[in-house]
Image (cartoon, helix red, strand yellow):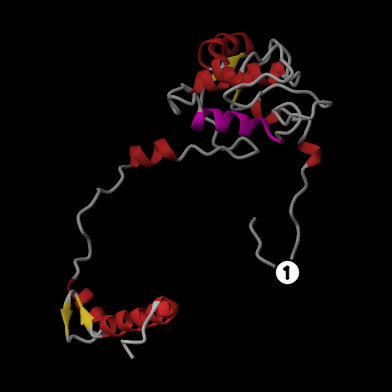
Amino acid sequence: MLKSFNIDNKYLAIVLGVLIIMVLGAYSYNGEAGKPASFINADTTAWPASFGFGKPASPQQIAAQDIDVRPDGLGLPLGSGTVAQGKAIYAMKCVACHGSAEKVVAGAKLPAPVLVSDSTSKVKAIGNYWPYASTVFDYIRRSMPYNLPGSLTDNEVYSLTAYLLNSNKIIKPDAVLNAQTLPQVIMPAQKLFITDDRRGGPEVR
């Protein structure tokens, strides 16, 4: 049979190779031939309960990550911010990526999405797409600025949120945002979102 073997038998060679590997795998363990595969489960019984990697998170570390804000404002921190304060912060930490929040340049190529729009624009942004003002605050606090996320103070986040909401013509220029006033802001797009009340399948509430 070996004498008649040629390149046309490559598929047969592949099948034979797979079978050999399966046979050797069934009767080898940890590089030692002759030990049945049933020993694999027995070997894990000696493993320690912990390998000693990492350490328990402290309450302070957990609190630093537990910063989610609900649509109704639950989770908003102490502090406040104004439109004027937010404008200065935006010019220093945001404009390089997002561009001007006061004059949107059509077709401009920016490293990050534009944040200002109106109800007639086809570009999805805060003014015509975001359903909750608290989401603006939550996203900025978690993710911005891009090169140093989480570095903004709560007052700075309130100020940036105020500036962006004002730039989108949602709040007045003299508005002051805090944990009480921010949840009261009604976003133009909120009415476009509906509660998923479907039944009969996987439900996430």
Residue ID at (17%, 87%): 34
* Residue positioned most to the front: 3
Main secondary structure type of the part rendered in magenta: helix
What's drawn in magenta, residue-wise? Answer: 131-143
Q: Is residue 109 above or below residue 51?
A: above
* Residue positioned most to the right: 120
Q: Residue 128: x percent and y percent?
A: 76, 30
On-image quarter of the N terminus: bottom left
Q: Is residue 197 left or right of residue 144?
A: right
Q: Residues within 10 Å of mark 1 (few under 14, many from 20)?
A: few
Q: Which residue in the structure is indicated by mark 1? A: 200
Type of amino acid under label 1: Gly
Q: Is residue 155 above or below residue 25?
A: above
Query: Is 120 contained in the magenta span?
Result: no
Q: Secondary structure at mark 1?
A: loop
Residue ID at (22%, 74%): 44
Q: Is residue 97 left or right of residue 196?
A: left
On-image quarter of the C terminus: bottom right
Give whichever of 4, 201 is nearer the camera. 4
Q: Residue 151: x percent and y percent?
A: 43, 24
Give whichever of 176, 122 is nearer the camera. 122
Residue ID at (22%, 65%): 49
Query: Is 140 contained in the magenta span?
Result: yes
Q: Residue 68: x percent and y percent?
A: 52, 39
Give whichever of 47, 131 is nearer the camera. 47
Which of the 4 image quadrants contains residue 20? Answer: bottom left
Which of the 4 image quadrants contains residue 101? Answer: top right
The count of marks equals: 1
Give whichever of 168, 33 is nearer the camera. 33
Q: Residue 146: x percent and y percent?
A: 49, 26
